[in-house]
Image (cartoon, helix red, strand yellow):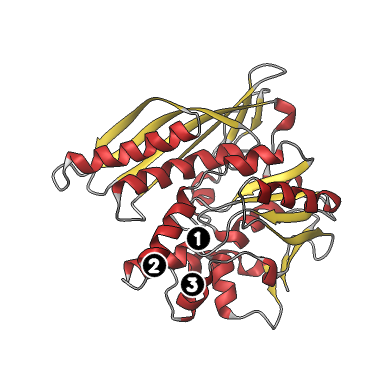
Amino acid sequence: MAPGDLEKALCGIEFPDHPDLIVGLGSPDDAGVYKLTDELAIIQTVDFFTPIVDDPYWFGQIAAANALSDIYAMGGKPITAMNLVGFPSEKMGIDILREILKGGIDKLTEAEVVLVGGHSVDDQELKYGLSVTGIVHPKKVLTKRGLRPGDSLVLTKPLGTGIINTAIKAGLASEKLIDYVTSLMAALNRDAAEVMQCFNIHACTDITGFGLLGHLAEMVEKTDIGVKIEAFRVPIIEDAVEFASMGFVPAGTRKNYEFRKDMVVFSSEISEVTRDILFDPQTSGGLLISLERTEAADLLSELKSTGVRDAANIGEVVTEPRGKIVIA
C-alpha cells in the first residue's frame, strides 16, 4: 500500500470512541492504547508482510521482531501474541511453514512473550506476521506527537535495509552482508526500550516502511515545530551507499519521497544517494527517540553499553521552519 492510501480510505468514516481510549485512529500512531485501570493500559498492534529473506526461519524471526517493535516504541512491554499466516499450500511444503512459525516462536521466546493463538488462510502469496498485546502505565505512554523544541533525536539502528535487500534479490550481496542485515532486522528493540525507561522521553516511533524521513514527517506534520537532521550523523549500513549509487533502490523509496517531498528541505550538499537512504523503507528498523538535549549523551552511553552499538544523535527539534524537516 502506498503512503497515504490508508488515510484516504478512512477519510469521512466516523470512528467509535471511548473515554478510556488513550491512542486510537483519531491520532494514528504505532499502536492503539486503551486504559484498563488508573495503573494499567493495554497496547495493541498488528503487522505482517511477504518474505524479505529466502530463509523461512529467519523470515519468521524478522516478522516477529518487526511486530513487537510497535509495543516497544509506545513505551510498553509486549506480553502476548497471535500468529497471522497466509500460506500457498499447493505451492509450498508444510516444512516451510513450520520453519517460519519456529522462527517467530523463538523470537517471541527471546522477548518473553507468550503465543496464545492465531489464524491462517490459504493464500496465493506467502505472508506472515503477528498481532501483539502489550502493557504500559497510562501516564507513561509514548507517542509520535511529543516532540519539544530543543530536543535531541536519537536513532538506534542504521538505515539501508531496503536498499540492501534489493541488492540481495539481484544477487549482488555477499554472504557476510546478508548475514549481517538479516541479524540486524531480526534484532529486538527491547534493549533500547528498556534503557528508555530510565530517561525522560518526550516522543518515540520505530522506523519501518516510510523510511526515516517519512516517519519524521508523521511526527512534525501539522505542528508548530520542525526538525533539523545532520545527515553525516545518521548511522547507515556502509554497503547501502554503494548499492544506492548503482541504482538498487526499492520502489518504496520513490513513493516515500513523492509523498513527503514538500515537507523536506535538503541543503545543496545532500546527494541523491543520501536522500534515497533517508527515505529508504526499513524492515524492523530502530527506534527514533526524542528527549531533552542534556540527557542525550547519557542515553547514548547507556544504549551502547547495553549492546545498541549503532545508536547515534542525528539531529534536533527546532521552532522554525514549522512542520518541516531540514537536512543539512
**Residue that appears at 75% across and 48% down:** 299
Q: Residue furthest top?
A: 37
Return the residue at label 1.
281
3D distance between C-alphas at marks 1 and 3: 16 Å
Label 2, on which residue?
166
Q: Secondary structure at mark 2?
A: helix
In percent of width and height, residue 156 lies at 63, 53
Single out the mark in the foreground, 1 or 3: 3
Query: Dividing the image into 4 quarters, which one contains the N terminus?
Result: bottom left
> What amino acid is found at the position of numbered circle 2 in the picture?
Thr
> In the displayed structure, would residue 225 be above or below residue 77?
below
Q: Residue 58: x and y, percent? A: 36, 48
Seen at 48% across and 61% down, the residue is 161
| Mark 3 touches mark 2? (CB < 8 Å) | no
Name the N-terminal-most of marks 1 and 3.
3
Q: What distance separates the C-alpha of mark 3 from that of mark 2?
A: 12 Å
Q: Which residue is mark 3?
A: 239
Q: Position of residue 127 (x, y in %)?
A: 32, 45
Q: Nearer the viewer, mark 2 or mark 1?
A: 2
Q: Nearer the viewer, residue 15 or 282?
A: 282
Residue sitting farthest toward the left: 90
Whole-Å distance between the Cαs marked 2 and 1? 11 Å
**Front residue of 322 and 155:** 155
Secondary structure of residue under mark 3: helix
